[in-house]
Image (tube, rainbow, N blue to C red):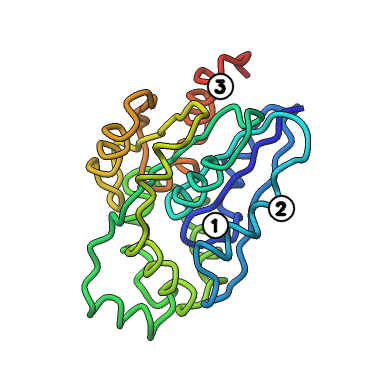
Amino acid sequence: MLTVILLPGMDGTGNLFTPFTDVFPDDWNVRVAAYPNDPDAGYKELEMQVQKLIPETGEYILLGESFSGPLAISLAKHADDRLIALILCCTFVKNPIQFGSSAMAFLAKYPLSFVPKSLLEKFLLGSFHTPEIAKLLHKTLKKVSAKTIVKRIKEVQDVDMSDSLLDVKAPILYLRATDDSIVSLRSSELIASLKPTITIIDIEGSHCLLQTSPEQSLHSILEFLQLKKY
């Protein structure tokens, strides 16, 4: 049985994967990482936790969404040949965020629930939002403290996984949203310049691609893996 390890975005809860996992093949063993709501836990600490999800036997896939792309790359760097694919979704090897100090100060003081819902939906869901996805998004973000979000943003600002990406031996697929207001085209172009063998697939959707376009995303993954279509 193929094991699929899903590493979540900035929220870290794993709850936002539900629309995506709902369309998965029944014969996949899905393991969803859930990060602690801990402002002291950076990439290094989270990677140690995620390592526990890697199966001791059998083939597996790593999927890193947004914030977790660098984590997935780091894990893939040290993986053996049981890792049959690294999937990167709307993510980066270097900081894609251009927040100023005033924005950081705001986020340090107020939880994301303080930000107008319409603004969050615009940047994260774009024109692909539905009432159901919007409800799931806001419910999930309320569970994460402002201090934890600030810590993760700082981790993103300081990260550079360029060298680690070069050492990844597994095939790499990058799922790129056509309407991503968070991670720009430059991020995927940088990854492609570092790893020319990468496969990039453009999918109509927002930054929350696996939530707004789950079927198309899974279809692209299955084609990449040359597995039987669902």
Q: Amino acid at mark 2?
A: Lys
Q: Residue 52 bears which disc, if any?
A: 2
Residue at 48% from the left image edge and 55% from the top image edge: 9
User: Helix, strand, or loop for circle 3?
Assistant: helix
Q: Amino acid at mark 3?
A: Leu
**Which one is earlier in the sequence, the residue at label 3 or at label 1?**
1
- Mark 1 lies on residue: 136
Residue at 50% from the left image edge and 62% from the top image edge: 43
Evaluate if marks 3 and 2 touch, with contact meaning CB atoms under 8 Å apart.
no
Front residue of 3/73: it is 73
Q: Residue 222 bears which disc, if any?
A: 3
The spot of residue 103 in percent (x, y) is 26, 75
Q: Residues within 10 Å of mark 3 (few under 14, many from 20)?
A: some
Residue at 63% from the left image edge and 42% from the top image edge: 5
The spot of residue 226 in percent (x, y) is 56, 14
Q: Is residue 221 above or below residue 39?
A: above
